[in-house]
Every structure is written in C-alpha cells, then in structure tokens.
C-alpha cells in the first residue's frame, strides 16, 4: 500500500519545491514555490504562473545545485 500524502502540499523552507495547479473553466491556474535559500513567491493566472516557474528554475531550486554533485 502506498503511503498517504500530507493534506497540505504547500512548499515550505523545510520542504522546498514548486507547486503548480492548472486552472479549470471556473478557476485560474495557481502556483507557488519555496526555496531552501528562503525565497518564496506565488502567482495566479497562466502568464504569471509561467513567469513564476521560469523564475524558480532559473534562480532557485535547480539553479542552486548547478555545478555541484549531490
């Protein structure tokens, strides 16, 4: 049996990451991130969520590990 996921999957500085939820006919897409460096951000709407993902991948998360081995 697979383990249960926590009820709240929001990224935190203790559990950093990027979360994106697609929009529906009645809601806008949403995204948020938290980086281990302390940076956080949120966005609503497709263009803003795209910018948020670009910022996270370019400046946080994976960008902090470029050139290092884990």
Image (spheres, rainbow, N blue to C red):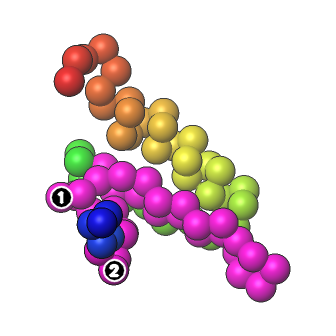
The spot of residue 48 in percent (x, y) is 65, 59
**Total numbered circles:** 2
Residue 24 in sight: yes
Report how far apart the C-alphas of labels 2 and 1 lie in the structure: 16 Å
The spot of residue 62 in percent (x, y) is 38, 33
Give the left or right position of residue 32, taking residue 63 as reference: right
Residue 39 in sight: no
Task: Report the residue at 47% width, 60% height from top.
Answer: 19
Which corner quadrant of the image does residue 31 belong to?
A: bottom right
**Dot 2, crowdedness within 10 Å: few (<14), some or many (≥20)?**
few
Camera-near label (2 vs 1) is 2
Instruction: State whether residue 65 is above or below residue 60.
Output: above
**Dot 1, crowdedness within 10 Å: few (<14), some or many (≥20)?**
few
Please identify the residue farthest to the front as the structure is shown.
1
Task: Report the residue at 75% width, 76% height from top.
Answer: 24
Q: Look at mark 2 in the image and give the residue it sits on.
A: 7
The spot of residue 57 in percent (x, y) is 48, 37
Q: Which mark is residue 63?
A: none
Which corner quadrant of the image does residue 69 belong to?
A: top left
Q: Quadrant of the C terminus?
A: top left
Whether the magenta-drawn stretch holds residue 5 is answered as no
Range of magenta residues: 6-35
Instruction: State whether residue 11 is above or below residue 57.
Output: below
Give the left or right position of residue 55, taking residue 64 as reference: right
Q: Secondary structure at mark 2?
A: loop
Instruction: State whether residue 13 is above or below residue 59.
Output: below
Give the left or right position of residue 4, taking residue 45 as reference: left
Whether the magenta-drawn stretch holds residue 33 is answered as yes
Q: Secondary structure at mark 1?
A: loop
Q: Look at mark 1 in the image and give the residue it sits on.
A: 14
């Amino acid at each position: 049996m697979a383990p249960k996921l926590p009820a709240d999957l929001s990224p935190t500085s203790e559990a950093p990451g990027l979360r994106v939820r697609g929009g529906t006919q009645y809601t806008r897409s949403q995204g948020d991130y938290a980086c281990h460096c302390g940076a956080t951000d949120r966005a609503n709407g497709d263009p803003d969520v795209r910018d948020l993902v670009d910022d996270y991948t370019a400046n946080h998360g994976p960008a902090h590990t470029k050139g290092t081995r884990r």
